[in-house]
């Protein structure tokens, strides 16, 4: 019996793949890419005056903003958390991220009509591969999903050893393998249910669990370099799973980047409990308690206005960088 089973954590049908975090440097261009080309909408926007204790914006202590975009509310649709550090001029992007696959005919038409050719990698009748302003690849398929389903079908990441990664995600994190879309070069994993029916199966809290975005792992057979522009994927789970996951990873000898903690202000009675893990290649994984995050991820009808207002913000001292991970991207005091 595996340690995951003996600890009696919840089943994989009670977890949801929520979002993927991307570090960006061009806020307005990125907003236009996600909204005008891909056809998403801004769900939430927040401005922070210092770094996140859970390193949501990376290992930076400077002011930053978080913009969340998706095709619908995060209870039912996969989202992208676009994090902008005010004092960072740029990032070194590695080979950890591969692509995002989206099934949306309008997005394909938008890309062909409005996107500059420098951002188009490949175009054929069935699909088009494009780059975001910061270089993230998106594969747009020229077909639509069933009305109400999420067009974001797959997030693809590269791994150095596919066998080890499969063991980590299936045995320890209890993800399922989509056998029909996997082979010895790559594997597609998922939580919840994978059906072709018009079902709306939810967790007790209300997160949709069927037909979720899949996680694809692609074996590179070479070292994974994450650079400083690495992302982070986030999953929801029942609150009691957080401590179980941490203890299991510690027992198995895998990295717990940030031990279980609660996010929220002193007077915040809806604190989210999280734990941040790292897989064998260092890919970051956030598990957050669904009971608290369900309310925290509600769509803000004023998100677009807050985003535009945030564009006016400037760091207190734009010529000084406080804390960073890469000397080549830091701002320094003027000499």
Image: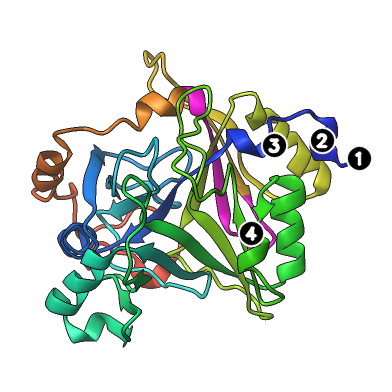
Q: Nearer the viewer, residue 286 or 235?
A: 235
Q: Is residue 107 above or below residue 191?
A: below
Q: Which residue is mark 4?
A: 178
Q: Is residue 198 visible?
A: yes
Tell me the element at label 2.
Answer: helix
**Which residue range is magenta in the image?**
278-291
Q: Crowding at label 3, few (<14), some or many (≥20) Cα neighbours within 10 Å?
A: many
Residue at 55 percent across and 58 percent down: it is 215
Q: In this figure, which colouring scheme has been used for the structure?
A: rainbow
Q: Nearer the viewer, residue 154 or 104?
A: 104
Mark 1 touches mark 3? (CB < 8 Å) = no
Q: Which residue is mark 3?
A: 245
Q: Which residue is mark 1?
A: 1
Q: Is residue 254 visible?
A: no
Mark 1 touches mark 2? (CB < 8 Å) = yes
Q: Decide whether residue 283 is among the magenta residues.
A: yes
Numbered circle sitting on residue 5: 2
Q: Of the residues tagged 3 and 2, which is closer to the observer?
A: 2
Tell me the element at label 3.
Answer: helix
Q: Quadrant of the C terminus?
A: bottom left
Residue at 76 percent across and 67 percent down: it is 163
Query: How many labels sit on residues?
Result: 4
């Amino acid at each position: 019996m595996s340690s995951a089973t003996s600890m009696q954590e919840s089943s994989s049908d009670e977890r949801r793949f929520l979002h993927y975090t991307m570090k960006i440097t061009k806020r307005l261009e990125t907003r236009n890419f996600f909204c005008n080309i891909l056809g998403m909408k801004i769900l939430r926007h927040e401005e922070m005056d210092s770094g996140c204790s859970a390193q949501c914006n990376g290992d930076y202590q400077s002011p930053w903003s978080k913009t969340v975009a998706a095709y619908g509310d995060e209870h039912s649709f996969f989202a992208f958390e676009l994090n902008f550090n005010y004092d960072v001029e740029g990032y070194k992007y590695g080979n950890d991220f591969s692509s995002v696959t989206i099934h949306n005919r309008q997005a394909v038409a938008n890309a062909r009509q409005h996107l500059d050719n420098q951002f188009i990698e490949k175009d054929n009748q069935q699909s088009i591969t494009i780059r975001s302003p910061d270089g993230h690849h998106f594969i747009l398929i020229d077909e639509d999903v069933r009305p109400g389903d999420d067009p974001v079908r797959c997030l693809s990441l590269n791994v150095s050893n596919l066998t080890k990664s499969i063991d980590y995600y299936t045995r320890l994190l209890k993800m399922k393998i989509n056998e029909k879309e996997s082979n010895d070069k790559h594997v597609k994993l998922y939580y919840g249910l994978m059906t072709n029916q018009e079902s709306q199966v939810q967790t007790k809290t209300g997160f949709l669990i069927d037909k979720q975005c899949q996680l694809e792992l692609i074996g590179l057979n070479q070292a994974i370099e994450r650079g400083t522009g690495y992302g982070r994927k986030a999953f929801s789970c029942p609150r009691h799973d957080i401590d179980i996951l941490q203890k299991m990873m510690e027992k198995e000898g895998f990295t717990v980047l940030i031990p279980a903690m609660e996010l929220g202000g002193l007077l915040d009675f809806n604190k989210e409990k999280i734990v941040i893990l790292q897989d064998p290649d260092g890919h970051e994984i956030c598990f957050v308690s669904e009971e608290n995050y369900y309310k925290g991820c509600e769509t803000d009808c004023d998100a677009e206005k807050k985003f535009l207002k945030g564009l006016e913000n400037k760091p207190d001292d734009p010529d000084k960088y406080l804390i960073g991970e890469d000397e080549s991207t830091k701002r320094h005091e003027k000499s």
